[in-house]
Image (cartoon, rainbow, N blue to C red):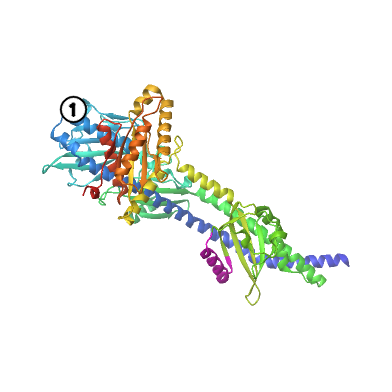
Amino acid sequence: MRLKKYIKTLGYITAIFLFLGTVPSLYFFDKYNSEFSRQIERSQTEGLRQLAYSKRELGSVVAQIRSTVQLLGHGSILHQFIINESEVSQQQVEELWSAVAINQQIFSQLRFLDISGQEKVRINYFPKTRSAIPAKELQNKANRDYFKYAQSLPAEVIGSFGVDLEQEHGKIIQPYTPALRVITPVEFGGKRQGYLIANLDVWFMSSILNFSPSLELIPEFVDSNGYYIVGHDQSKTFGHLIQGRGEFNLPATHPDLWAEMVTKKVGSHYDGDTLFAFQALYLTKDKGRAPLYLLISIDQRYLQAEAKLLLKTVIHQASIVLLVLLLVAIPCGLMIMQMKKSSLESQLAKAALEGMSAVVITDKHNRIIKVNDEFSRISGYSALEVLGKSPSILGSGKHNQEFYLKMWSALKAEGVWEGEVENRRKDGSLLTEILRIQAVKNSRQQIQYYIASFVDISERKQLEKRLRYLSEKDSLTDCWNRRKFDVELKEQAQLTHRYPDTHLSCLAILDIDYFKRINDQRGHDVGDRVIRHVASILKSGSRDTDFVARTGGEEFAILMPHTTTVEAEVVLNRLRVAVSSYSECEVTISGGVTDIKEQAEEAYKRADVALYDSKSGGRNRISICYSHDDIA
């Protein structure tokens, strides 16, 4: 009789379990398929977002390139050289161009060709070494395609001419060095005098794209004919220039993708094996020229790996649900057999309370009636200390009243709220958590309880803050780095644009004089100590509101808000004198200062021109280059 009772009870439990488990099984199967589709969509979105970021980063560089080429092409120093080709005027052009190449690190070559295609001046800056080419080694480029393209350019137009490999005397330089040429005619006196040609360092431009949260999202460069210029696999690049690589061409390997790239300019394409995201990029304002393309390729292995993680998560969730259903089915079977009531809500609450998340259950008046052990471990409060109290005892004061009004509004309207909250533990330390609050309603849709669960992500948030801080600091000097400086400079320019009558701000660029001589004569260890010494003086001698950054090898920049150029000059001269007191070796600095107006790039160029004036005027001095407004 007892055996029969056990068998019947087991039968009821099995039937209830199978009945309850059918719908969740179908749900999780559909959830997996839906989530995998959404994963594809998320990957597309991430790829396009990364391309938009890369385009913005490259866009700022491209704007800098266009502005620099225009300034150099219209510069009085170049015009004076064309009028009077002397060693002095040529040296002045070479010094100016060398300073531009070193400071901006974008150009691998700068040169001027006369109207016959003969090189008159050329500066090489690769690999990261500057050299002015002697007159006897200058070449005639009249037979090169880019010179013929230069001849077709109208006045005042800046054009770009494809991607090519650097050559010397008709031979390709080893290792392969790709270059993208930006060209503008040089005209004055009512006639065309020649052409300024700037070779862009493609490797440097591609390094801008390497800042990505995932290696899968680092873009590649593809030219207008579908050949890889910069790619993850270097053996597939320059198929149009290097023999044996012609097969690595998008029109041949992925014709459907290429058709979309040419037509749409920006978008994504999934061929069932690889997910692509693409973005057209124009380096000049001449949209008639064929563009370059940024291309992100996410292959099937990455998508399958994501699918496996998703499947593992779904199986884990399904297992938990089926286990909970089994726990529900057992008391239900016993209830049928033994005619005893069993509370399904208490069984579910028990399963939740024994989980890995911290759980808080409150009544409809938001008074705590139950917490689990994980809550006590994370918060430091025991169950007895919080029972009957409001969860607001964990409040940190970091969120305003509007935040909580929106939370309660969502709970009332949707019955659930989820988000990131910063609370405070019993010991006073901050607690960052992912919090989910679920409203439990009765049959009349009246709220009876609130179930809140959260996980502690404090360590992860601290790590994120630390990594963000380190990414903005220069490791040698602990000054801010170039990336952070660019952001702050743009912000100051935006403030000036927003408050033109009240916001004053200055930019100074400082450079250690004869630093290469120090490195060559005293060694790099002494050079590093000199850089650290100068950085220390700039940081300690600047005001609390000033922003000190190391923007290059021996170059520093200081942003000085709420400061006139006269006040800035006084501060900079004080710093210059302090630097010269270095006892280990003779060290001086030269600087240029300007006022910041609406365009950050223009302010940087003016400060750079002022720095050049200080260098040309004998060094160890501070020069000012005013904006047009100040001059007026």
Q: Is residue 86 above or below residue 238?
A: above
Which quadrant, please, contains the N terminus? Answer: bottom right
Q: Nearer the viewer, residue 558 or 433?
A: 558
Q: Tell me the quarter of the picture where residue 486 sits.
A: top left
User: Label 1 is placed on what type of residue?
Assistant: Glu
Was residue 402 drawn as part of the magenta stretch in this picture?
Answer: yes
Q: Nearer the viewer, residue 187 or 314?
A: 187
Estimate the x, y position of residue 535 in percent, counting from the top left.
Answer: 41, 35
Was residue 248 drawn as part of the magenta stretch in this picture?
Answer: no
Q: Residue furthest top?
A: 521
Residue carrying label 1: 87
For residue 143, say whether it is visible: no
Q: Is residue 312 left or right of residue 203?
A: right
x 84%, y 67%: residue: 5
Estimate the x, y position of residue 576 in percent, counting from the top left.
Answer: 34, 34
Estimate the x, y position of residue 173 in percent, counting from the top left.
Answer: 32, 31
Q: Is residue 94 above or below residue 31?
A: above
Q: Nearer the viewer, residue 143 or 386?
A: 386
Estimate the x, y position of residue 442 in percent, counting from the top left.
Answer: 66, 74
Q: Which residues are magenta?
A: 399-416
Q: Nearer the viewer, residue 236 or 604?
A: 604
For residue 622, say whether it is visible: yes
Looking at the rendered structure, the number of numbered marks drawn on it comes to 1
Q: Is residue 50 left or right of residue 65?
A: right
* Crowd class of label 1 (few under 14; some 14 to 19; many from 20; radius 10 Å): few
x 43%, y 29%: residue: 529
